[in-house]
Amino acid sequence: MSRLAVIIPAAGSGSRMGTHTPKPFLTLNGKTILEHTISAFAKVDEVVDIRIATSVDWFDQVEAILNKFADDVESASVIEGGDERQHSIFNALQSLDNSIDLIAVHDAVRPFVSAELIRKCAHRASEVGGAIVAVPAKDTIKKLGDGFEISETPDRSKLWQAQTPQVFRADLLLEAYLKAREDDFLGTDDASLVERIGGVVEVIEGDRKNLKITYPIDLKVAGLILNEEDL
Ligand code: CTP
Ligand code: MG
């Protein structure tokens, strides 16, 4: 059985949500979004290590949440985040030891990920190097030039929206992060860092329920999903 660590970036300020409290610490049905998210990973036997990246102001709160999962994993800890998502993940990556085979990265603000999807993604990553959850693009995507004029309309049938979890062999992900840092490359997901060093990353078709809570409307949808699950 592979030993899987999960890094959960939770250090963002939530500018698009616009709440004073950062998104991972907003509550849904009495539990923080972060706790809902950690629960999914704690159910997966392969997950032995959980690392949460956040700002120092939230360390106590995260430690209290992690205590609830102490029996599910070998190790669970909080790491200081950085100015960008990529920096938050880099800090957590550097804190891992070499007993870990696979690393999953998962946004704190995707609380509806299923244990089954995590397992599927981890299994495929162990076979090919990297695997990420994605869904086919439902909207036509327009590429713009410098202004608002459209320069290109890529064929939608080839476009997928990347989500998390994104799982990689540990050595491959570390190499990708070190190279990105050396080149001052900032990506919007983890796979893009691995792709640019020639690593193989496959897509696993995911679930539209695995939404990223980004705007106030997403919080409303999240509330509806939870109420439906409680029925
Ligand atoms: N994140 C992080 N460190 C950062 C920025 C983001 O750990 N410097 C985390 C967020 O907390 C979130 C995940 O990365 O769990 C995905 O980011 P996003 O949804 O963009 O959250 P925010 O950056 O907080 O929101 P916004 O972009 O609207 O400010
Ligand atoms: Mg952001």
Image (spheres, rainbow, N blue to C red):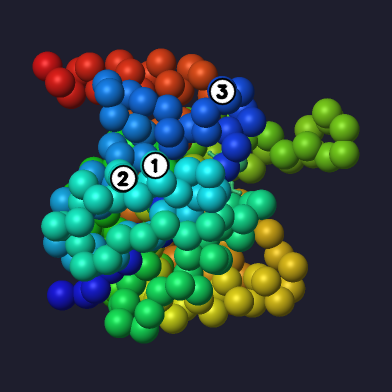
Sequence-first disc among 3 and 2: 3
Up-down: is 141 above or below 70? above
Q: Amino acid at mark 3?
A: Thr
Q: CA distance from mark 2 to mark 1?
A: 5 Å
Q: Is mark 1 within 8 Å of ligand 1?
A: no
Number of residues whose C-alpha sits closer than 10 Å to that of mark 1, classed few (under 14), some (14–19) or many (20 or more) = few
Q: Earlier in the sequence, mark 1 or mark 3?
A: 3
* Image spot of residue 148 (x, y percent): 83, 28
What residue is shown at x 65% (from left), y 70% (from top)?
A: 180
104 lies left or right of 57:
left
Spatial CA span between label 3 and label 2:
22 Å
Q: Camera-side residue: 147 or 79? A: 79
Residue shown at 29%/73% (left/top)?
A: 126
- List the residue tagged with mark 3: 19
Q: Residues within 10 Å of mark 3 (few under 14, many from 20)?
A: few
**Mark 2 neighbour density, 10 Å: few (under 14) some (14–19) many (20 or more):** few
- The span from disc 1 to disc 3 (Cα, nearest Å) is 18 Å
Query: Can you tell me which quadrant of the image ligand 2 is in?
Result: top right
Q: In the drawing, what numbered circle is on residue 64?
A: 2
- Left or right of 88, for residue 152: right
Residue 78 versus residue 207 in the image, above or below: below
Q: Quadrant of residue 206?
A: top left
Q: Which mark is residue 70?
A: none
**Which residue position is annotated with label 1?**
61
Tell me where residue 187 appears, x and y as whole percent: 64, 57
